[in-house]
Amino acid sequence: MAYHDPLTQLPNRALLADRLQQAIAQAKRQRTLLAVCYLDLDGFKQINDTLGHAVGDRLLIAVAERLRTCMRCSDTVARLGGDEFVVLFGGLSDMGECECAVIRLLSTLATPHVLGEHSLAVTASIGVALHPLDGDDADTLLRHADQAMYLAKQAGHNRYWLFGAERCSR
């Protein structure tokens, strides 16, 4: 209970911190990239405000399930709260592999969610920080991924932004 979000059953911030430390250590040992992806749902507030919190909660549960389908068993998806999630993709050999994984996340989430009588289209803005390129510790990587996510939102939603890059991608 102390390590999982009660709504989605995903790891919470406390368990994410532990998993991120382990993923950093593993990336160092294997000399691979670790992608820390900070994800915020686009348009969630409007859904919550117009259809109510019960529908919003059902949508968050559906999003959590979709995120799980994009993961390898060695990856982590966590809910920080509200409509914010973090995904860790470890063992990446290059940037292309990272971008394919993030594009898969965007595509999976963009498919409308059918919840009873409602068909809800929700997309995501994703910020990506890479270990070791964008930081060597958990706090720095999360902060940089969060900053990149805000740049993705400002660029128009349903896209990702690589920290330190001069561009975003769709």
Image: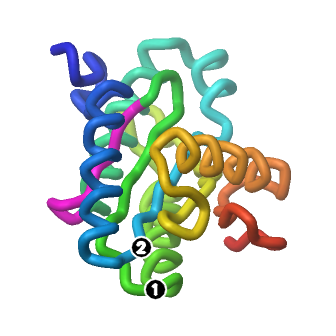
Image-based side of 94 in relation to 129, left or right: left
Image-based side of 41 in relation to 109, left or right: right
| Mark 2 Cα shell of 10 Å, populated few (<14), some (14-19), many (≥20) | many
| Mark 1 Cα shell of 10 Å, populated few (<14), some (14-19), many (≥20) | few
Which segment did they paint magenta?
A: 72-79
Q: Amino acid at mark 1?
A: Asp
> x, y percentage for residue 34?
40, 65
Image-based side of 118 in relation to 19, left or right: right
Image-based side of 109 in relation to 42, left or right: left
Q: Is residue 24 visible?
A: yes
For marks 2 and 1, give the CA distance. Answer: 7 Å
The residue under the point 61% across, 27% down is 47
Q: Is residue 163 above or below residue 94?
A: above
> x, y percentage for residue 12?
32, 27
Q: Are marks 2 and 1 in contact (CB under 8 Å)?
A: yes
Q: Amino acid at mark 2?
A: Leu
Q: Which circle marks residue 94 in the picture?
A: 1
The residue under the point 53% across, 30% down is 83
Q: How many marks?
A: 2
Of the two numbered discs 2 and 1 on the same chain, state the one appearing first in sequence.
2
